[in-house]
Image: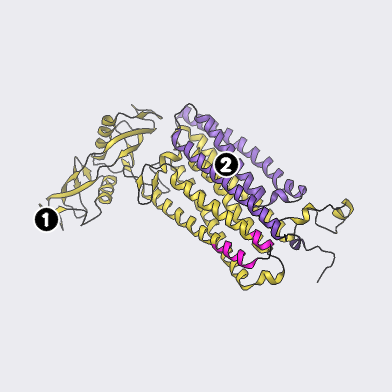
Chain colours: A yellow, B purple
Amino acid sequence: MAGHASKQIDSKTLWGGKISPFSTSYGKLMMWFFLVSDALTFGGLLIAYGFTRHSCQDAWPIGEETFNSLPFLGHGYPLIYVALMTFILIISSVTMVLAVEAGHRMDKKGVVKWMVATIIGGFFFVGSQAWEWSHFIHGSEFGKIEMADGSMAIVKGHFGEVENFTIFEAGKHHKVGHQITSDDMDLDHEYRHAIAEGHVKNGVITLHDGSKANISKKDNEHMELMIKTDGGKYKIGKHIDDHNLAADLYNKVVNSGTKGRVIYGANLEQNEYGPKQYGQFFFFITGFHGFHVFTGVMINIIICLGVIRGVYHKRGHYEMVEKTGLYWHFVDLVWVFVFTFFYLV
Amino acid sequence: MLRDDVIEYSLDAHHSEEKGKKIRKKIWQVTAILTAITFFEVVIGSTIKQSSDYWQAVKWLFIGLTLLKAGYIVLVFMHLGEERKTMKYVILVPYFMFIAYLIFIALYEGTSVGNVWALYGGA
């Protein structure tokens, strides 16, 4: 801690060049200055996000609509996953501050223990973010649809499982009467890919080899549509919660056989969650933050190796641990804001 | 070149076993607070929807809680609260002045741009 800061220093010494007016070492002060400039970068990015969001208003998605999945458990868990990520990062910040505290007692073993814990937490966070990105890029089971009147809607509900494809017109590989099951291919993936490409029409799917097959699929249940772009009939903000009507509208689009009426997942050109800037900001800001976390983990590893080798113990103080700690807490701090403005509000 | 007039501030940071215990207690207290705030935010976020009448209030509540969390991280975990006052203000005041202005001007402008698009039908 800043032991010196609590001492009384008369103003002649304080401003006479004998002492830093901040009572901190050069290294720590420079780390703070760097963090202020980095905070301005993130501040600028988040404010640019805010600008774009305010200019799109209702079309902008909110977190609970987009991020509602958990690994292995599927959909229907709004915000739980990101809350877990936030918790992991907060805990790794706590272990870091405990490492700093151990350093102030010259407890080398303690510093190593808590720094290793921090590094593990950091890797967990980066891993979680990879899953999050993968999920964001691949998208939901339903995708976003463009309806007949030109309006765009995002879809909620329970996806009915695809059971099999039965070939009725042979292609290069598949013979007539052949039944393709989940043992042969990932049916859901094939089905979604075909819809996006416009290869599904009136319950018939055209496979890669040109063969045609009837789709056997359970019905989608509890369907709801949320209009995100104005059309001739449906306006922005409209919520179609009549399950039958929603299912009917959805099936019409899926079975239209037109390419691009259903968008799954996200890339820089388009995304199923909202305006395309939403995806761009998501990738840039969480990506830039993830890059900071990754760098933080690397710096932590380097400093931790130094601690193990006893470099700082010989030096008589563990200020290097404190400085990396500052950077690591800053990464946590940025995530607190990203969490609020991307996921909560 | 070794200078004997330069104070090695890093050595002042050492503290005793008892003081360490107190500091650790404080750290765990702050951990509990941060965890509780995050948990509370998630519960509110997943129960109150954007279409609700309370949404506007919830939004401001979230922003307030975020600033509270940020305050704990900066002042306790980063020890800025224990630094000399001059340093605290050199870090915080210019940043907040600039950011507050930027938030105001960018969001105000964003809304205006959105209105113009809505009026003239741009995409």
Tell me the residue that label 1 is attached to: A175
Whether residue A278 is visible to the viewer of this picture, yes or no, is yes
Whether residue A303 is visible to the viewer of this picture, yes or no, is no
* Left or right: where A238 falls relative to A96: left
**Which residue is drawn at the image coordinates 34% and 37% (left, top)?**
A155
Checking the image for residue A47, the label placed there is: 2
Q: Position of residue A182 (x, y in %)?
A: 21, 54
* Left or right: where B1 falls relative to A268: right
**Which residue is drawn at the image coordinates 76% and 47% (left, top)?**
B85
Query: From the image, which quarter does the N terminus of chain B lie in?
Result: bottom right
Question: A103 or A214, which lies in front?
Answer: A103
Question: A195 or B26, which lies in front?
Answer: B26
Q: Are marks 1 and 2 on the same chain?
A: yes
Q: Position of residue B57 (x, y in %)?
A: 54, 30
Q: Residue furthest right?
A: A12
Magenta span covers which residues? A100-116
User: In which chain is the residue bearing label 2?
Assistant: A
Main secondary structure along the magenta-highlighted residues: helix
Q: Quadrant of residue B93?
A: top right
Residue type, numbered disc 2: Ile
Checking the image for residue A144, the label placed there is: none
**Which residue is drawn at the image coordinates 59% and 37% (left, top)?**
B64
Q: Secondary structure at mark 1?
A: loop
Residue type, numbered disc 1: Lys
